[in-house]
Structures are given as C-alpha cells and as structure tokens.
Image (tube, rainbow, N blue to C red):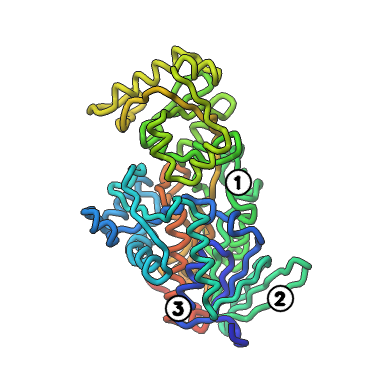
Amino acid sequence: MSEDRPELVVAGAGGGLVAALRAAQLGLEVLVVEASPHYRRGNNTSMSTAMVPGAGSRWQREAGITDSPDQFVADVARKTKGEADLRVARALAEVSARLVEWMADDLGIPLQLVTDFHYPGHSVDRCHTVEGRHGSVLLGHLVRKVRESDRITMLVPARLVDVHVDDAGCTAVIAQPDGRAEHVETGAVLLATNGYGGDPELVARHLPEIARAVYHGSETSRGDALRIGERLGAATAFLDAYQGHAALAKRGATLVGWATVMHGGFLVDRKGRRFGDETTGYSEYAAQLAAQDGAEGWLILDQRIHDACLAFTDFRQTVESGALVWADTLEQLARAIGVDARALAEECAALAGVAGRAGADRFGRTSVEAPLRAPFAAVRVVPALFHTQGGLVVDGHARVLRPDGDPIPGLYASGGAAEGISGHGAAGYLAGNGLLPALGLAFLAAEHIASTGACSDHPTSQKEDT
C-alpha cells in the first residue's frame, strides 16, 4: 500500500473482503481492519455454507434454468409476506449474477450451481457454492486474492470503534490490542462487522424468542456497526430479524444441515412426535424447536440421506464427531434415543405416505423425496442463532441513510451491519440471505466509492430514489 491515505477502510474481513478486492481492482488503496486473529475460521462468512444466490447466472443457463432478478425479488417478497425492503432486494438481485460471475472470472473461485436438492422458498435453483460447500473454503479464496494485491493492507487484530464524518472527509478510529487508538483519514468506511448476535443483551432486547438458543456465530459480532451508525444519526430497520437454524448437533455443536430434511428427513420432539412442517425453512423452524420440551429434538434420516449429504463439509464433521445414532429398525432407534417407538413409527409411516404423491400431511408438508429405509439414524439437535438480519438502513449503493433518506457521507454498510432482505423475525429467511448482502452490498459499495469519491460529496448531493 502506498503512503497516501487509504481511499477505503473496510471494517471486517468476511464479506467485506469483496469490497476490498473490487475497490483495489478499480484502482483504490484499501485498509482492512479485522478484530479477530482467528477470522479465517471464526467469522460468519467462514462458518456459512457458502451459498450465494445468482439470478440469471451462466451456470443456470447451462443447466437450462430460467431465472431473473424479477423472479428473485418475487421470491423474497413471497417469503417475507411483502415485509422486506424490496429496494435493497432489487439492488442485490440485479447484481447477483454479475457478482458470482466476477467471483469466478476475476477472483478464480471455482463456483458451482447447487441442483441436487432445493432450498425452501427459492422457486428455482440459484444458489452457487464452492467445493465442500463451506464458507471457510470461500473465505480462503478471498484471503488468497487479498494477499496477492499490492493495494490492500490488512490490520489484524484491530477493531474499528468509531467513525467521524464531515464535509472534508472521514476518520476511522481504530483500537489496537494494546489499547492505543489510531485515527486514520480516509475517503470512505465500509461497516462489514456483521450484526449483534454476539451481544446477549441486544439479542434479548430484539430477539426474545431465540435468546435462549445456542449462538453459533462470530464472537466479534457485537453490534459495533449498529452503535457507530446510531451515533452518526443513521436509521435502523428490521432489528427483530435473524437467521436461526434447527439442525445444530448438540454433540460437537456442528451443523447437521437442512439438506437432510430436504432429502426426506424430519424432526421429532423428545416423545418421538413431529411438531410442524420442516420444509418451511430451517431459520423459522429454530424457534419452533426452541419451544419444545427441553428445547431440543432428534433429526431422523437414513443411509440414503446420509450419503447424499456427505458433499457438505459441515455434515461430514457431524458424522466424524460421532453425533449420529444408528439402528437397523425404527424400534431399535427409538429405544436408543429414548423416544416412544410407536410414535416414531407412526411419524415415519405418515411421511412415507406423502412421498411421491400429491397432497400434504397434517402439518402441510408436501415434499418428501423418498420414504426412509433401514438402517436409520438420528442426531440430537438444538436450536441455534446464526446471525442477525437487521441493521443500518442502506440504499442500493450500500450507503448508510439517515431517517430522512439522506446518505451519511462516506459511510457504507454490508452484511449483518446493514438491514437485510428477510423482513421481520426468522420466517422470511431464504438460503443465501446472509451471504448475498455480505458480498453483494460490499461489491456495490466498492463500485460506488470508486465512481464518486464518496466523502468528497456534499452530504445531500447524492440522495437518490434507489
């Protein structure tokens, strides 16, 4: 990096690295500030399943799948019952195909379209991922490209604690591990520090229904961006939104994954009874699991589902942890996990009756890939909070907005630091609704900063209806 001041400071080395890479590609000098020395395996990007929606990508065309930003936005509107900020959803949908193709062509990330099972809420297959279907692999590719760039400097560990903004520019206040505070003048700041899932007080205040669940996210997601933005007068939205998960293995705290359900698995409570339609989505089902006796249950699968899910690193880690209980009959499985054998057999038979037929079960589930066959397996699961989905209000360029709609000059937000596209609560979450805002808003921010000079603009000169 040159001795000149950075034109962009990125706080957060997860999806924010996309902003750093795109900005550097466009000729900007970038400083990345990351609070955790273990970010490569401990931030929310690295802990994700690396699913990035891309509406209208070349992989879809090659697979004969017709998709468009309009269709993606319609899916978001339908899943959120019209509650999501469709301006942001539109901006992300329109950039999504270009984003995944840029990641493949310019960053050399080997992406593939997931077509072996279908995520709830997406009307077509549009999620793109990497080998192993794990965020640590995706983040590894981003870090590799950052290290190859002579325009990007990484400062790790260090924490962005404040931002000062005026008409002359921005100043990023960075706390060093020894307590020293460094003031860095810059053209713009991107808040990419995720949400507030790591702050129990904020979670209890905004997400009481999931506050007792296991938090399975970065310890540095403590609401830093929210506090910085609010001090600068930013508007906030959807602070009650989150991504939950109903398939975290109690043993080892590994992610079993919802592919198990979409391939035909199901969840039962401690008595062996199902308690809802699992295919509505893994996020909202976390609260349903949390409401059961003991706030835990069992995920039931078979050998076919086991083998189909080995493509996921998370699932393989669950298997390797010894979390799966196997049995040759349902009666033996029920005895091994301590549930009522008759109840378990009845639930399995009821779902087998749905497989391959038109109609729904008593909970409304219509999708069962195939009846379960021996040998059977069960995993004890607990509800989890993965990350929050609300934050600072942004426009289609990822600029942070005040309540009157004016942008705060030079301040941008992405991922969990920004408002998401999942509406309120957990029911509006679609697979990729965390990672797309993390990568997509970062990408859009970098392009806007490069094209406008960010902080040099007058505070009210960039207000747009986007």
Kindly report which numbered mark, 1 or 2, lies closer to the viewer in this rendering. 2
Kindly report which numbered mark, 3 or 1, lies closer to the viewer in this rendering. 3
Where does residue 6 sit, x and y in percent of width and height?
Answer: 58, 81
* Residue identified by numbered label 2: 182
Amino acid type, label 2: Glu
Identify which residue, 284 or 87, lies in the foreground.
Answer: 284
**Sequence-wise, which precedes: disc 2 or disc 3?**
3
226 w.r.t. 209: above or below:
below
**Sequence-wise, which precedes: disc 3 or disc 1?**
3
* Residue identified by numbered label 1: 203
Q: Residues within 10 Å of mark 3 (few under 14, many from 20)?
A: some
The disc at residue 128 is none
Residue 466 seen by the camera: no
Identified at 35% across, 18% down, the residue is: 349
Q: Residues within 10 Å of mark 2 (few under 14, many from 20)?
A: some
Find residue 167 and report its image quarter: bottom right
Kindly report which numbered mark, 2 or 3, lies closer to the viewer in this rendering. 3
* Residue identified by numbered label 3: 25
Identified at 46% across, 43% down, the residue is: 426
| Alpha carbon separation for disc pair 3 and 1 | 37 Å
- Which image quadrant: the N terminus? bottom right
Where does residue 319 sit, x and y in percent of width and height?
Answer: 52, 36
**Sequence-wise, which precedes: disc 1 or disc 2?**
2
Find residue 362 and report its image quarter: top left
Amino acid type, label 1: Val
Image side of residue 341 versus residue 229, left or right: left
